[in-house]
């Protein structure tokens, strides 16, 4: 009896590391010290000493049950983008710049090519975010996970100058809420998605005219949009972002109040932008009420931020010029911290 007979193939792990090396190294920033394969990743903070009061900001998350769609379709190249997005999109809500990312993959059986494919997606997400992939762990856990399944989570660290952090403290009535379009469902609400839709491979392969001729699986696996460059564009364009929220689990109702100070109420005009058709399918096929939809999904808006009224049009123009679809979707009024949909 040996470890391989017990279900853990150490050689497969070595092969996976070799296959993922090119993906990992493609994300390296100048601050990365050393290569892959060590016991920890090292990242120099020397370039950030010029900040008046540097603050580390961090985020951790996973992909959740969206992975079940990837398993059914046997497509694993984009879930890594989701994993990175879920972490770095939280970091930028504070005004932080993502610096580096670490991943954790737990699987029933280490198939090196599949693991390398997953890491390739993680690397793509890191490149989009400007973050270095400096480490990770692949844990082969036979008997705990089915042989063809895995879980995927990650952890990101960023940096911000404390005096420039986005806190929401200065939000006031009359300020304007800007929304940035999502790429679809992103990575939240998939337990409900899987209850509503038949997610067998046959049905996931079906194309729908209402989805622009795309297959259901293609739409559901669309990776989460990463908003690092979008917010950077707005800030570098001279617009002050007063508050920011990532529309993840809990939809509008849970996430929008997280950026508000006491005494500020958000009023969102749900007709101010076009909701992607997949949400209409979910609402109809699942007989889901409007409030439940906005309490579960991003409904086509993946990120919101608050600006002075005088900066609203400029913020939208900057987003649109950079290739992001931005909209004025609401405003701030006096009232209890919370949200009203109109």
Image: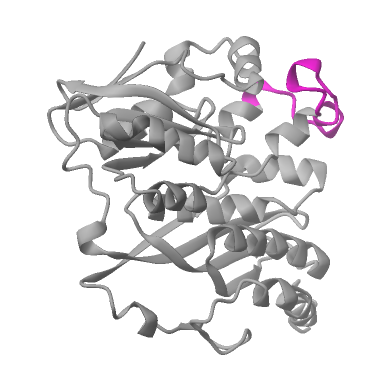
Q: Is residue 150 left or right of residue 259?
A: right
Up the image or down, 178 lies above or below 107; here it is above
Identity of the residue drawn at 56% across and 20% down:
275
Expressed as whole percent of the image width and height from the top left, the position of residue 270 reads 44, 16
Picture quadrant of residue 4: bottom right
Expressed as whole percent of the image width and height from the top left, the position of residue 330 reads 34, 22
Give yes or no for residue 317 being in the magenta stretch: no
Query: How does the figure colour the protein chain or chains?
Result: one colour
Q: How many marks?
A: 0
Picture quadrant of residue 276: top right
Residue 249 seen anywhere in this rendered image of the structure: no
Identity of the residue drawn at 63% across and 70% down:
139
Residue extent of the magenta highlight:
195-214
Expressed as whole percent of the image width and height from the top left, the position of residue 210 reads 75, 16
Q: Is residue 303 left or right of residue 109?
A: left
Identity of the residue drawn at 83% across and 34% down:
201
| Front-lying residue, 93 or 21 | 93
| Front-lying residue, 104 or 312 | 312
The quadrant in which the C terminus is found is top left
| Front-lying residue, 148 or 169 | 169
Up the image or down, 245 lies above or below 274; here it is below
Expressed as whole percent of the image width and height from the top left, the position of residue 199 reads 75, 30
Up the image or down, 18 lies above or below 279; here it is below
The quadrant in which the N terminus is found is bottom right
Q: Is residue 46 left or right of residue 226?
A: left
Residue 38 seen anywhere in this rendered image of the structure: yes
| Front-lying residue, 110 or 333 | 333
Give yes or no for residue 197 being in the magenta stretch: yes
């Amino acid at each position: 009896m040996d470890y391989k007979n017990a279900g853990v193939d150490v050689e497969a792990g070595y092969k996976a590391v070799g296959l993922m090396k090119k993906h990992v190294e493609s994300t390296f920033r100048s601050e990365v010290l050393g290569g892959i394969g060590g016991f920890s990743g090292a990242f120099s903070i020397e370039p950030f000493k010029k900040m008046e009061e540097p603050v580390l900001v961090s985020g951790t998350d996973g992909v959740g049950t969206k992975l079940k769609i990837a398993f059914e379709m046997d497509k694993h190249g984009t879930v890594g983008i989701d994993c990175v997005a879920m972490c770095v999109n939280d970091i930028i809500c504070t005004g932080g710049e993502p610096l580096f990312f670490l991943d954790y993959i737990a699987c029933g059986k280490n198939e090196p090519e599949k693991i390398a494919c997953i890491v390739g997606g993680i690397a793509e997400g890191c490149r989009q975010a400007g973050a270095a992939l400096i480490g990770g762990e692949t844990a082969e856990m036979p008997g705990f996970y089915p042989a063809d399944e895995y879980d995927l989570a990650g952890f990101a660290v960023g940096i911000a100058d404390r005096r420039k952090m986005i806190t929401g403290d200065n939000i006031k009535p009359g300020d304007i809420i800007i929304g940035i379009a999502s790429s679809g469902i992103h990575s939240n609400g998939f337990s409900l998605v899987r209850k509503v839709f038949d997610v067998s491979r046959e049905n996931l392969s079906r194309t729908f005219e209402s989805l622009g001729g795309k297959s259901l699986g293609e739409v559901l696996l669309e990776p989460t949009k990463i908003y690092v460059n979008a917010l950077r564009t707005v800030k570098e364009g001279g617009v002050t972002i007063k508050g920011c929220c990532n529309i993840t689990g809990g939809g509008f109702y849970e996430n929008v109040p997280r950026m508000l100070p006491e005494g500020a109420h958000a009023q969102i005009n749900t007709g101010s932008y076009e909701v992607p058709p997949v949400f209409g399918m979910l609402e109809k096929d699942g007989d889901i009420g409007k409030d439940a939809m906005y309490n579960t999904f991003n409904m086509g808006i993946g990120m919101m931020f608050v600006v002075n009224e005088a900066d609203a049009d400029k913020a939208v123009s900057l987003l649109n010029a950079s290739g992001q679809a931005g909209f004025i979707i609401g405003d701030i009024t006096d009232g209890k911290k919370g949200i009203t949909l109109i």
